Image (cartoon, grey):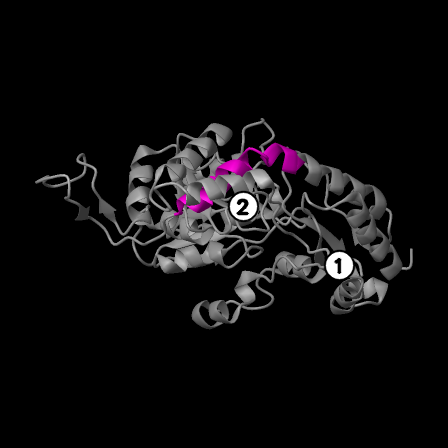
Amino acid sequence: MENFIKYGRQSIDEEDIAEVVAALRSDFLTQGPRVAEFENAICEYTGAKYCVALANATAGLHIAVAALELENGCEGITSPITFVASSNAFVYNGLKPVFADIDSDTGNIDPAEIKKKCTAKTRVIIPVHFAGRPCRMSEIQSLADEKNLIVIEDAAHAIGSAYPDGGKVGNCQYSDMTVFSFHPVKTITTGEGGAITTNSKELYDRLVMLRSHGITKDPDFLSENPGPWFYEMQSLGFNYRMTDLQAALGTSQLNKLEKFKARRDEIIWQYNDALGHIKGISIPPEDDNDSCFHLYVVRIDFQKLGITRKELIAMLHRQNIGTQVHYIPVHTQPFYRKKYGYGWGDFPVAEKYYSQVLSLPLYPGMTKTDSERVIDAIRISFKQ
């Protein structure tokens, strides 16, 4: 029986395993030197001044907004085509989540729509680099500068991507903070895990405390210092620390990022060449950035083809090929409908996009045979 091809999965080798084993055999399983090593490696790769490694990217989004110390009742803007964590970060911190519709080609938030949604209460924008393609950040930065807004890039999909000028996502040239995810389906993994980069020492210091219960032992921040045992809880923080085991894996994975990116590109080129001419399928548009794609998302006119998405997913599953849908628009979730009054019809571009998309398998461990199986299965399903 042929192996099941998931839509995404981790790529772990013996070097990764050896690094985790070395951490297991060390004196520190957590709160040790491996976390700082990983943070420094991320800074070196992205060009950011500071990095805070965390338990997961949701924790990163949460404390990135918390570090801004905004008043309750103000507003934050993000995309409806994202995982719920992006907008939940506003809710956690007492902000009203506001959505701005997307660009129909890329799935990214549309800067023109952001501008329409800005009010006197708007304080922060979280653009989401959907599938790994960076948003139009220069336009978003200009809008933020004009209206004195904070920008937090949700780069959960975009480690390894670069802007048109060549700068790496995460260098914070267009934002105040950038948040990464290292979940197993992402380009590199720490098992679970995330990180925030920033060029602001003030934000960095707040993030470090928020990550660990709001506690500091740094003499520069203590109100008194009776001895080396002393610590102070200066804010209400959280236990969002990354372990040394995770960080050891992350550092090893980061060393392979460019290799992973190259392999993902090869699969994407193969898909584009084979699927681009099939009637009813729209492959991802050309990219002005140097993107490291986390997802390969096609748009399908199911109505024209006379097949439902559910039927296509089932057909592919029977051929041991997994797919996924990214994403159900956040504003249609019951929580957001009940609490904030959002509903179907509010963001028509995002809703139409959702109705047509399907994510096909994409991860470095896929063989040429695997990708050919996916292509053949699509051709059979579309009678090509």
Residue with the most extreme front position: 25
Percent x, y for residue 97?
44, 58
Q: Is residue 54 left or right of residue 138?
A: left
Q: What amino acid is labelled 2 in the image?
A: Thr
On screen, residue 217 above or below 350: above
Q: Residue at x 37, y 59 (%)?
A: 92
The segment highlighted magenta reads 242-261
**Residue carrying label 1:** 321
**Residue 259, magenta (yes or no):** yes
Q: Is residue 7 left or right of residue 156?
A: right
Residue with the most extreme right position: 384
Percent x, y for residue 8?
65, 52
Please tell me which residue lies in front, 250 or 262: 250
**Residue carrying label 2:** 189
In the rendered image, which quarter is residue 255 located in? top right
Percent x, y for residue 267?
75, 42
Q: What amino acid is labelled 1 in the image?
A: Ile
On screen, residue 323 above or below 372: below
Cβ atoms under marks 1 and 2 closer than 8 Å: no
Q: CA distance from mark 1 to mark 2?
A: 22 Å
Sequence-first tag of 1 and 2 = 2
Q: Residue at x 50, y 30 (%)?
A: 45
**Residue 175, magenta (yes or no):** no
- The numbered disc on residue 258 is none
Please tell me which residue lies in front, 10 or 138: 10
Q: Residue at x 39, y 39 (%)?
A: 35
